[in-house]
Structure formats: C-alpha cells, structure tokens
Image (cartoon, rainbow, N blue to C red):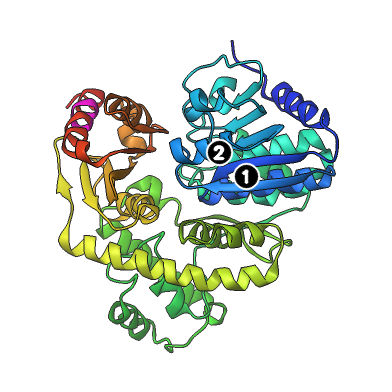
Amino acid sequence: MKNNISKQFQKAADKIRSFPKDTRIRVISHYDTDGITAAAIICKALLNAGYDFHVTLMRNPFDKGLERVSKEENKVIIFSDMGSGQIETIEKMKSEIIIIDHHQFIKEKTRDNVLQINANLCGINGNYEACGASLSYSFAKALDKKNIELAPLAITGMIGDKQYIGGIRGYNKNIVDEAKENNLVSENIKIKLYGNTLFDALYYSIDPYYSKISGNKEGILKIFEKLKLKEDIKIDELDLEQKKKLQSILLLTLIKKGCEKNILDTIIRPRYKSKIFDCELERLSDLIDSCGKGKARGVALSILLGDKESFEEGKKIEKNFKDEVLDELLRLEKDGFKDKKSYRYFYTKDSSLGGVIGGIANNYLIDKEKPLISIVRKNDEIHVSCRGNQYLVKKGLDLGDAMKKASIKLNGHGGGHAIAAGATIDSKNEDEFLKIIDDILSKQMGI
C-alpha cells in the first residue's frame, strides 16, 4: 500500500512541533546541490518555526559519518536527500528520526522512532519526479504554509539533480507551477550562458560541455572571428541575429559529437529566475554544486541562507573547481576511457570530481550504449561513482541495485538511483568489484 505523502509530511511536522522551542534540531544532508538546498530549506523552516539547528553536509554517508552522529546526544535528527539507503545504521540511533529521501529504499517498515518519508514509497518516481529539495520543501510547507517562499530553493535542487532532463514532471512540476503562480520565479526560454563576458561563458561551460570550445581559447576565438565579435563582448551586448547564429554553432557542435536527443532538448529550455537571489536558478545551482564539491560546503549553505559575501567567495571557488573539471574532461577527451563488456570506466584523482566528470562525459563525450564509472583510489578504499542514461534504464539498467549488491558482497557500501549511483569498498577488492559489476550489469541489460 502506497503512503500518502501529504499525511507523512504532516506527521513529520507534528513530530517537530512536539519538541520545545529550545530543542536544537540536528540536520544531516548530502553535499551536492540537491542535498545542500534540501538542508537550507529545512534550516530556514526550522528558524521560521523558532528552532535552532546544527547541520552537517556529508560527502559519504556511510560508516564514518554516521558513526560520529550516533555518538552525539540528539533528541531529534532530520536526514534529507539520504537515509533510506543507510536505514540499518540509522535505526540503531536512539534519537527521534525523520528521513526525507528519494533514493532507493532498503525496507518499507522501520522502528517506531524512525519516520521514513521516501518518494518511491508514495508512488512518486524518485529518479525523475522528486528530489531531496522538492520533498524537503513540502515538509517545510507542512510546518508553515508561509514557507511557500522557499520554492525557488526547491527548484534549484531539481536543477542540480538534473531532473529537468525529459522535462520537469510529476511532483516537481506541481512545485514549479505553484512558484510561477505565486510570482516567486519568472520563466524564460533560452540557452545557458553566464559569465562576465561571452568568452568566459563559453570557456567555463562544462554542462553543457562543447567539444573543442569549452576550455579551448583557440576554438572560441574561431567562433568570434566567424561572428565578427570582439573578444571582450558581454553576453547582453549580443543582438538577436548574433544570438541565433551562436546557438546554431553550439547545437551543431553537440549534434556532431553524437549527443542524445533528450540532452539536446535541454540546451534551449525554460530557465527560472528568483528575486531572492537575483540570478538564474541554474546559475545558482552550479555555484552551490561547485562549492559543495570544491570542499566549501559551509560557503554553499551560507549562500542559500542569504549571505551576499559568501556569494562572492563562492564565485572564486567555482572558477577553481571548473578549472579542475575542465582539465579532467580535456584529458579524457584526448586519452579516452577503459572498456569492459557492460560499462566504461576511468580513474580520477578526487572523489568529489568523479561523479561530476562522469555525468558530463556520459552526456557529451561518449555514446549511449554503456554506463560510465569513475574510480578514485584513496588510502585503503576506492570510491566509485557511476552514471547511466534513460535509454539504458529502459533496457534494464539499475546502477543503484548493482552498486548495492556488489558492495555488500565485498563488505562495502553502495546504492543510489537506477540512473546514477555510487559505492565505497576496500581497495584490495578493486579487481573483484569490477568483475562483479560487469556480471551484474550484463545480466541487467541482457548483454
């Protein structure tokens, strides 16, 4: 029987209200855009309700992070954008717990002290129709209807979780429609370009990644010469005809690279702007993701909580992060990827970069026939991040299930979505892990 998600959120709100206002609420969330915006929504809602909070943004919500939390004395903990995949560890905690998640769940029924609100248990597809931020927004509204003002943060999380691919739909669409109806966001159909100059916008474009243009000064100057543009021209100085020609060049670049239609359809699409941040929410999403994965999670959260100085600091962090991403993408475009029967893989130096690079490469550098796995060797562990596509999911691909099964066999941890997942295992089991994954994915896709 499917859970009624509205009743679940009301139950969660009642649980929070049952604690006196001097209770400090513990908030644990993920460190990407979706997780950070989910945390920001919850923190703002708690502040509006008169509660203090202590928030942690985790990169790897497995043994070490949760072990630290379990040693704390917390009356109540809210897990957002995570929790369902770590339920067995969380259930051992003595606190009252609320889980707000959209990833694959391990089990439906939990102990009495744990309220698990998972989109997939409520008839909502957690891969495409709801993310951590959109679910956290609904929890915030259950606490107080005035928290509707947090809708732009929910949309920022959707964008960060790439749930616009194939069009914003289902649970997410209801939130976007609500935000538009209440004039909380404005919508404009356009191509993604932002930066101090057009040159900067093209050079630092990593998603979309334009082969021979992104990170390539000579490639950009050839375009400028063709369009008779000055090197320092600003984006808003382009006339309509110049914009049309530029869009045609960029789209043709992606088509020549074999980019899939569902990705091409995202290049020129609705973009949303909020008065709160005075910028496009996709621009905000990229900034938050860069800070979160660029080891500046506190800066990312501060930006979302309204600190203007943090916004400026975040832009510097974003530039450095994008430089690192571009270096890796240019290297992979030159050297290529390693091949297994059912997947491709590559090694990178930083686990925070692995998922980002894998997602971009999967959409803009390789064909659709195999998922892509990134591997980072760190101390005595390997950190794995993998990305698929909707075509492969229709063929039976379930990366979350594959990561979970393979890691359990090797005493590691793993899980996620059908289209994107991750795992952490002991480095001595690397070769065996790669073989097990190959076997599982081959069976899933009937190879």
Give residue 38's mark: 1
Q: Are marks 2 and 1 in contact (CB under 8 Å)?
A: yes
**Kind of residue at disc 1:** Ala
Give the image location of residue 153, x and y in percent: 66, 50
State which quarter of the image contains the C terminus.
Answer: top left
Q: Which residues are magenta?
A: 437-441
Q: Residue at x 57, y 78 (%)?
A: 236
Q: Residue at x 28, y 28 (%)?
A: 406
Q: Residue at x 37, y 32 (%)?
A: 413
Q: Is residue 350 above or below residue 123?
A: below
Give residue 286's mark: none
Q: Is residue 440 magenta?
A: yes
Q: Is residue 387 magenta?
A: no
Q: Is residue 7 left or right of residue 390?
A: right
* Residue 327 in view, yes or no: yes
Q: Is residue 284 above or below residue 340?
A: below
Q: Is residue 321 above or below residue 432?
A: below
* Residue 154 in view, yes or no: no
**Kind of residue at disc 2:** Asp
Give residue 81's mark: 2
